[in-house]
Amino acid sequence: MSMYEKKINLFLEGLASDAPVPGGGGACGLVGATAAALGSMVLSLTTGKKKYESVQPEIDELIQKMAKQRIRLLSAIDRDAEAFRPLSEAYGMPRETPEEIERRDAVMARALKDAATAPLDMMELLLETASLLSRISEIGSMLAISDAGVGLSFCRSALYGASLNVYINTKLMKDRQLADQMNGRVEEILKKADAIIVPAFNAISVNLKGE
């Protein structure tokens, strides 16, 4: 059974244990998938309503896109777990002789790159999800606008959480050029995400408060 096919209580029990996976990366994937599901819920409450018939074609398109994002983010939970296992094994490799050290360093380099790439790819998915949620908050049913806001806040939390999972691996990389490149991409994504999420969330908040 893949990680994302587990029942939520089993997933959380695993998360709470001393098992190496799931960890923070898997948790971010679950939070992101929940954000996507919230977007889908808003769309479900909007589709077919006469009040929103002018945007129905876009609603139809968003329903398909958001369903795909949810599946992709759930799949990212397994991707994160799969990327961590080789790294966990590399830490246990012997390093008594120069040959063993060289072998371990080579394995570590590959494992660190993969372990950093998984959350970085997840961040790309979360950024896309946030962009879709922002649009949903503009054209979706006003009766569920708060749920779009929750989804946006979940995306932001997952993005910042995933960024730490990139940094913890790039910090250990000997290839500092690659590390800087990956860290730079993280910063770009967070900047783009904040530019999307913060205004959208604030607009929802103002709307709900009636200001």
Image: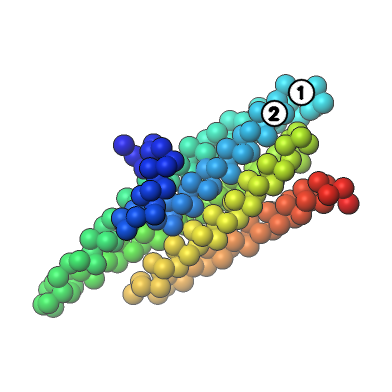
In this picture, residue 156 sits left or right of residue 138 = left
Residue 57: where, in percent of width, then height? 71, 26
Q: Residue beneath label 2, please?
A: 45
- Quadrant position of the N terminus in the picture: top left
Colour scheme: rainbow
Task: Measuring from the top left, give residue 159's x and y in whole percent.
Answer: 55, 57
- Looking at the picture, tell me which residue is in the foreground, 7 or 116: 7
Instruction: Decide: is 172 above or below 50.
Output: below
Q: Quadrant of residue 101?
A: bottom left
Kind of residue at badge 1: Lys
Q: Which residue is mark 1?
A: 49
Quarter occupied by residue 188: bottom right
- Residue 54 in the figure: left or right of residue 108: right
* Nearer to us in this view, 199 or 177: 199
The answer to whether residue 86 is seen in the rendering is yes
Find out whether the residues at labels 2 and 1 contact each other: C-beta distance under 8 Å: yes
